[in-house]
Amino acid sequence: MLLILLGVLILHVIILILLIVSTAASAWSVADNSGKDLWYKCSTNNGGYHCQPSSNEDWIQAVQALMILSVLFCFFSLIAFLYQLFRLVKGGRFFFTAIFQILASVFVMCGAIIYTVMCPDDGTHPNFGYAYVLAWVAFPLCLISGLIYIVLRKKE
């Protein structure tokens, strides 16, 4: 039982790191000499690296908010798991932790879908970067983790 709890805890920390990196990294969309993320549009011109704030469009602000919410809910579910690990009655399930973790997975999924649909093609033919891929990798891991918390029971 201790190995299962340790494995779930390690999985949870990995998911939290994935979400933080995908939210903060500057590679959601990359082209030859430019890159876009949730916060900045950067390009290389004449040997210099220039960054501008991302647009104030509603869709990018929605993606920013959803990714921040996913990080916060994943963090709060980690805190809830550690609290329930020591305070939950024997035989109890980790429902509160599971709800927060599943909500985090829904938030990251919605943010990635909005970015996929609304990402503008400004003629540079950008490719999706590693931060975008990390967000999509974090989604199923977060959902699986939430489902594991539903099934998991505290034993002696």
Image (tube, grey):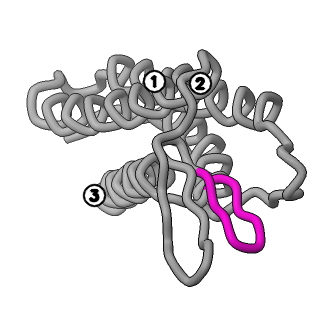
Q: Amino acid at mark 1?
A: Ala
Which residue does the image show at 65% across and 43% down from the upper left? 140
Residue drawn at x 89%, y 57% is: 125
x%, y% of residue 33?
69, 72
Q: Mark 3 or mark 2, which has the lower sequence index?
A: 3
SS at mark 2 in the image: helix
Q: In the rendering, which numbered label is found on residue 8? A: none
Q: Is residue 136 left or right of residue 155?
A: right
Report the residue that reaches farthest toward the left. Answer: 87
Mark with earlier residue (1, 2): 1
Amino acid type of the residue tagged 3 in the rendering: Leu
Q: Which residue is mark 1?
A: 65
Q: Is residue 110 magenta?
A: no
> Which region of the structure is painted magenta?
28-36
Say which residue label 2 marks. Answer: 106
**Of residues 121 and 16, the one drawn nearer to the viewer in this rendering:** 121
User: Is residue 77 positioned above or below 144 on the image?
Assistant: above
**Which x, y percent locates residue 10?**
36, 60
The location of residue 70, given as percent across then percent down, is: 44, 31
Which label is found at residue 2? Answer: 3
| Left or right of residue 24, residue 66 in this image | right
**Is residue 110 or residue 28 the one in the foreground?**
28
| Residue nearest the viewer, comparing 40 with 140 | 40
Return the residue found at the far bottom: 47
Residue farthest to the front? 46
Residue at the spot x=38%, y=19% of the render? 95
Mark 3 and mark 1: Cα distance apart in space: 36 Å
At label 2, the amino acid type is: Val
Magenta segment includes 33: yes
